[in-house]
Amino acid sequence: QVQLVDSGGGLVQPGGSLRLSCAASGIIFRNNHMGWYRQAPGKEPELVARITNAGITNYAASVKGRFTISRDNAKNTVTLQMNSLEPEDTAVYSCNSRDIWGSYEYWGQGTQVTVSS
């Protein structure tokens, strides 16, 4: 059974930091590209950051320079370090896995991030 378990969300003041984690099980982690998506109320889901199985990263323009995605293939985890948070970053953040052949895709349950004073 495949599981992606997201954690680390919460309430933070503007300018603060949060660290999101996604623990994967039931997949061959090293054969999966991993990503974080977010969806704010009334908006479409958007890709925040992605890291390939080879460790290549890409970011949405709105978070570049503030967020960092990383993966630990030994622990089957992917992490999103979010710094200099802004109210516009408020959303539900969900982890995503997609195998390198494009055959399977899975999602975490999501974790709420709220940036507010």
Image: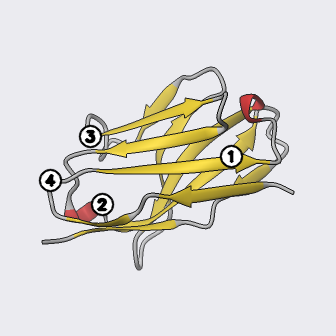
Q: Amino acid at mark 1?
A: Ser
The residue under label 3 is 66
**Which mark sits nearer the N-terminus, 2 or 1?**
2
Q: Amino acid at mark 2?
A: Asp
Q: Secondary structure at mark 4?
A: loop
Whether label 2 touches label 1, CB < 8 Å: no
Using a 10 Å C-alpha cutoff, classify the residue at mark 3 as few (fewer than 14 neighbours), some (14 to 19) or many (20 or more).
few
Q: Position of residue 48 (x, y in %)?
A: 44, 48
Q: Secondary structure at mark 2?
A: helix
The residue under label 2 is 89
Q: Amino acid at mark 4?
A: Gly
In this image, 1 relative to 21: left or right? right
Using a 10 Å C-alpha cutoff, classify the residue at mark 1 as few (fewer than 14 neighbours), some (14 to 19) or many (20 or more).
many
Q: Amino acid at mark 3?
A: Arg
**Which mark sits nearer the N-terminus, 4 or 2?**
4
Q: Of discs 4 and 1, which sits in the foreground?
A: 4
The residue under label 1 is 97
In this image, 111 relative to 29: left or right? left
